[in-house]
Image (spheres, helix red, strand yellow):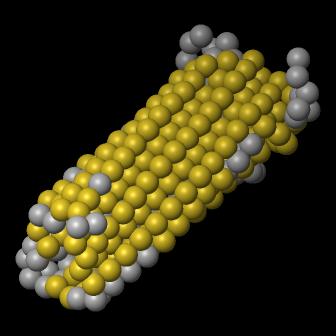
Amino acid sequence: MERIIRNESFRGERPLFGLRGTRLENVRRLEGESGVKCCFGLEADGCEFIGKYPLWHVDGSVITGCRFRSTARSAVWYSRDMVMRDTIIDAPKLFREMENLRLTNVVINDADETFWNIKGLTAEDIELHGGRYPFMYCTDVRIEGLTSDSLYIFQYCRDVEIHNARIKTKDALWECDNVTVYDSELDGEYLGWHSRNVRLVRCRISGEQPLCYMNGVTIEDCTFDAACDRAFEDSFNIDARICGSITNIKNPASGRIVADRIGSATIDGNILPPASCEIGERKCGVTT
């Protein structure tokens, strides 16, 4: 670092504009609008961001042990190559229009409209609370350890891999392409609608009408709770191996569905062609 700014406070508009190769240490109050803007090679450790839009157009940054207060809305936009660790965020609408974002141990207490149009997102041990529509239009996403109660999570995303997540939501994974989820709890109505090439492995699935209107859905050794009725409606190219029982399957268009026990299957005149999906009971883990 060429310059260190330590134990200071700043206010007003753009007090730290255009910094290059600078480290901020214990900058306790960054008030005002656009506190740090158009910077390159920035480090911030133990800092408190209060004003709106504090980190815009900041490339090549490392943010550790910081706090974004509720007034620091829309805090990180139009930035590339950011690493953030051990940070608490109380403000909504963070992380938009970005490339190559890496997060570790980050808690977001107002996840409203957070993570929009991120290209290249890697995250480990993150929490999202409240709000709607996090992870809109994201591509190339890898997450290990996610806890979220935000609504309408992961919509219009591509190339997503998630491990060890606990997600309680509604309308998750809509209009997505190429998604794989491992060893996770997915609790919410209308999971996966209108998506393509979705693979769920050893997941626990809860909520009404999961996995409908899809093309290419693979279920490997997942469990479904009793509320999962009308599953797979109008879905094509299904390959589902379900452990335990599933309450109801409705009008799957093509593929194969097997479970330990199938409560009922609704096949009526509304089924879409080719109407060729195989449905049967088979003990979990037994292959044919």
Q: What residue lies at 23% left-to-right and 67% top-to-bottom?
A: 2
211 relative position to 94: left or right: right
Left or right: where does residue 215 sit relative to residue 252? left
Q: Is residue 251 above or below residue 68?
A: above
**In the rendering, at what x and y percent does residue 62 appear?**
36, 63
Residue 139 visible in the shown view? yes
Residue at the far left: name it.
13
Figure quadrant of the C terminus? top right
For the N terminus, the image quarter is: bottom left
Identify the residue shown where x is 72% and y is 21%: 256
Where 23 falls versus 262 (above or below)? below
Vertical arrangement, residue 211 with respect to residue 20, above or below? above
Which residue appears at 55% of the width and 57% of the height? 124
In-front residue for pair 177/224: 177
Q: Quadrant of residue 27?
A: bottom left
Residue 184: image location, x then y, percent: 67, 51
Q: Quadrant of residue 279?
A: top right
Q: Is residue 152 visible?
A: no
Number of residue marks? 0
Choose between 150 and 37: the one closer to the eye.
Answer: 37
The picture places residue 99, in percent across and down from the top left corner, at 32, 46
Q: Residue at x 66, y 53 (%)?
A: 164
Question: As drawn, is 104 to the left or to the right of 218?
Answer: left
Q: Which percent across, then down, holds residue 267?
A: 68, 24
Of residue 273 and residue 77, the one placed in the foreground of this image is: 77
